Image (tube, rainbow, N blue to C red):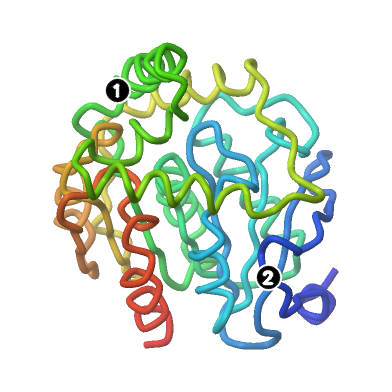
Amino acid sequence: MGNRAAASRATDLAWVHAPTQTLSAGGFDFAYRELGKNNCGTPVFFLNHLAAVLDNWDPRVVDGIAARRHVIVFDNRGVGASTGPPSNSIEQMADDAISFIKATGYKQVDLFGFSMGGMVSQEIVLKEPQLVRKLILAGTGPAGGEGISAVAGVANYDLLRSLFTGKDPKQYLFFTRTPNGIEAGKSFLVRLKERSQDRDKDITVGAYLAQLQALSAWGQKDPADLSVVKQPVLVVNGDDDRMVPTPNSRDLARRLPNSELVIYPDAGHGGVFQYHADFVPKALEFLAR
């Protein structure tokens, strides 16, 4: 399938109505959704966070980027509606993502990786630099970064908290416990439910555990030499990220020679969702340069 075939399927539909499709690559069927402007610059591939499926992306962020760009969002293998055994290493997730991207026929893409997806994005640009034009790395950090190997403990603690309080764990994991953070979390969770038809399958326990294993190993490995990444990079986070501590974003921006850093106040891991009205124009301006 070439670029023209891929682009012809992009639509002006809102994210909540974009059809779920499948594409075979590397022996697996990848579930994905595609929307936005046909033939409008380099396509933007979204890479998911820990435990995320397609329906964990904020519609305001997807629709906002798709208003100007061609957007493709996909589940890695073994996650959501994608087939195959789930990957248990960030490096393997990157190989799978590269396989999927190449199967779409695109020769060069932009990457928007959130959290674990930002780690996968770093591996992609190191493995296949010619494939990547620009990167947006949100709520993430470098290999071996502060607290990354402890993500499992933080996530599982908040999963337990959510069971006892009846709240969605993302309210704790993605947002601060200030009045602004709590309201932002509530609004975000309402937006995630806007799609009522053709929702993605939830992640399985096995896939979640495989991802935790991948994060733990990636958090303990030696940092990569990111000075070789010449692509422009936009690094974004909240100032109080508990999952991937905010100093990682500052460290990442220092390590990347062509980067710019945005830190949102009174915001956590999900800063790009809390501040979507500010983030989307910044992201579009960055991609359009």
- Of residues 49 and 120, which is closer to you in this image? 49
- Of residues 12 and 123, which is closer to you in this image? 12
Q: In which quarter of the image is the N terminus?
A: bottom right
Q: Residue at x 40, y 18 (%)?
A: 165
Residue type, mark 2 in image: Ala
Q: Which of marks 2 and 1 is nearer the N terminus?
A: 2
Q: In front of the other: label 2 or label 1? A: 2
- Of residues 42 and 114, which is closer to you in this image? 114
Instruction: Name the secondary structure under disc 1.
Output: helix
Instruction: Name the secondary structure under disc 2.
Output: loop
Q: Which mark is residue 220?
A: 1
What is the x, y in percent for residue 257? Answer: 20, 65
Q: Which mark is residue 14?
A: 2
Residue type, mark 1 in image: Gln
- Number of marks present in the image shown: 2
Q: Which residue is drawn at 18% across and 58% down?
A: 263
Distance from Cα at disc 2 to Cα at disc 1? 40 Å
- Of residues 19 and 82, which is closer to you in this image? 19
Query: In the rendered view, would you say 246 is above or below 226?
Result: above
User: Do the numbered discs 2 and 1 sit on residues whose CB atoms are within 8 Å?
Assistant: no
